[in-house]
Image (cartoon, helix red, strand yellow):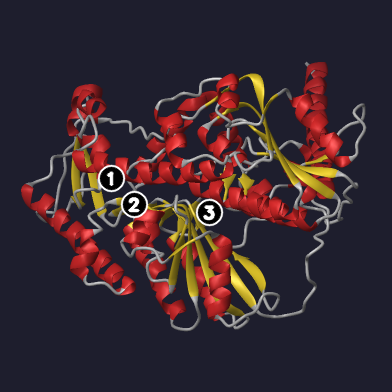
Amino acid sequence: MRQFLKFVLATMVGLFLFSVVSFLILLGIAAAASSGDEVSIAEGSVLELKLGQPVVERAPRSPFADLGMEEMFGQEGIGLDEIKASIKKAKADDHIKGIFLNLDLLQAGMASVEEIRNSLLDFKKSKKFVVAYSEFSTEKAYYLASVADRFYLNPQGTMELNGLSSEVMFFKGTLEKLDLQPYIFKVGEYKSAVEPFILDKMSDPSREQTQSFLNSLNDFMLQNIATSRKKSLAEMKNLSDSMLVHNAKDALRYGLVTHLGYYDEATDYMKSRTGVKKEKELKLVNLGTYKKAADPEKKSGSSSNKIAVIYASGDIVGGKGDDESIGGQGMSEAIRKARLDKNVKAVVLRINSPGGSSLASDVIWREVMLTKKVKPIIASMSDVAASGGYYIAMACDTIVAHPTTITGSIGVFGMMVNSENFLKNKLGITTDRVKTGKFSDVPSVTRAMTPYEKMHIQREVERIYDDFTTKAAQSRHMPVADLRKVASGRVWSGIEAKQRGLVDVMGGLDQAIAIAARKAKLKEGDYRLRTLPAQKSFMDNLFSDTESQMKAYFLRNELGDMLPYYQQYQRVIQMQGIQARLPFEIEIN
């Protein structure tokens, strides 16, 4: 027994020491990866853009990304800010001779793709080359790659060019099988966020609005492809609508790609353009490395003037929020910090949100209104700025959106579920209660609602809708009656929204910053950008969020394509209070 205890103790000590040493090594690796030393870029290099991870607004702060360990340590996306900054830097960098788009699946929203595409078009003004390679080109990937001087599609590859679609999953039958009775409260015939729980297919208004904004996005995309590939819009629409392109040979026949070739053929061409011998390696530089390279155009000016760029990404919720949600309290603090900072001369509110809590949206709106009184505040809409996302944008001095932004959805809803029959019939659980008053147990999910209780909640939803539309009308300088004609929960593309007075200017984040500078009477070079809210440091993430990051990693690997549905379920159960939210999970394919 004594020998056994010694063995157990020795094992425990060994495991403890191993854990300590491993942790110290981990910290050493992290410190090395996060060192601020600039890297040197070799002459004749090519910037490689591999966009296989989701494109998010801001690059997650994780030094492990540089070590290829990002999946295990929370690097769940590539920052749009990092991509654009690298392309802009490469344009002026004499050591960078071109950009290599190494594309297959592109996980990005339509407006994010547009921002990257516009950055590439600007890069081409330097007369440097852009080469694309793909083995399977999705619609979004092709839209991005269509700007390339040379596009190599694998000879055995395929191309998707058949238009856009959006699919909605309905749960009415599931709720019926489970004996769950939903109560729906909403205002606006187009407010279709609740439809998956009460219908088994799209309503006519929902189908109408979805068809409209998909057509708007598709026409815009095809027009830009036609311009890049020197074709007519009619020709591109025929190729898409008739699905004439299936494989690589079709893509070459119709002039959508310049070459059929393998990866080595694409790299051989770039070697010839950069002066590298064929038997040598092409000097490819990835984003993680290039962001540490010196910026040849970076000015060391000492101006104290700042423009604050405040990122509002994710669902709008109460509380502080995090990197994946917009907390009413946390976002208000960020806007307040920019408002009270005398060195901040203007604010740009960068929004990528389908909405969420109407109360949290109103809390943020109030801070926007207070800021508007003392300095310019500009809204920059990304992929989505709808419902609550529009709520926090509408008070800004100017609203800037991409043609492909999804916005509008000015409407509210509330939802409750009576689980009494589910508990009783499926689980054998019953409930009983004692009350001091007639309505002391309102709201309750374990009994049916009375007509009076339902009327009370519906009136509250209508009151919030009236407040929403009144504030929107005041901000947009429109009669309330006119505003409500384009409200009712209807979703619009950026182009459609501008035509109806909901948006002021077509453009991206750079245009919004330029407008903010102009309104603040700042010339280029007279200001610096300050980004808010502050992101967690690596050490904060390591100690406070490791469990959730590991959970996310294993969920991605375990659920695969089913992960979005699980995430949707999680959003449903976390909804609290009246919601100003986009129709459920618009996914454009």
Mark 2 or mark 3, which is nearer the start of the sequence? 3
**Along the line of sight, the residue nearer the viewer: 127 or 537:** 127
Image x and y of residue 398, in percent? 44, 71
In the image as oriented, which residue stretches furthest toward the left? Answer: 451
Q: Name the residue under label 1.
A: 209
Q: Mark 3 points at which residue?
A: 322
Residue pictured at 59% horizontal, 20% vertical: 249
Q: Is residue 409 visible?
A: yes
Q: Mark 3 and mark 1: span between their CA atoms? A: 32 Å
Q: Can residue 337 be seen in this view?
A: no
Mark 1 or mark 3, which is nearer the start of the sequence? 1
Q: What residue type is labelled 2?
A: Trp
Q: Which mark is drawn over residue 34?
A: none
Residue pictured at 69% horizontal, 40% vertical: 149
**Along the line of sight, the residue nearer the viewer: 562 or 176:** 562
**Along the line of sight, the residue nearer the viewer: 128 or 461:** 128
Residue pictured at 74% horizontal, 26% vertical: 263
271 lies left or right of 455: right
Q: Mark 3 and mark 2: span between their CA atoms? A: 28 Å
- Up the image or down, 516 lies above or below 242; here it is below
Q: Mark 2 points at which residue?
A: 492
Crowd rating for badge 2 (residues with CA inside 10 Å; few <14, some 14–19, many 20+):
many
- Considering the image in quadrants, where does the C terminus appear? top left
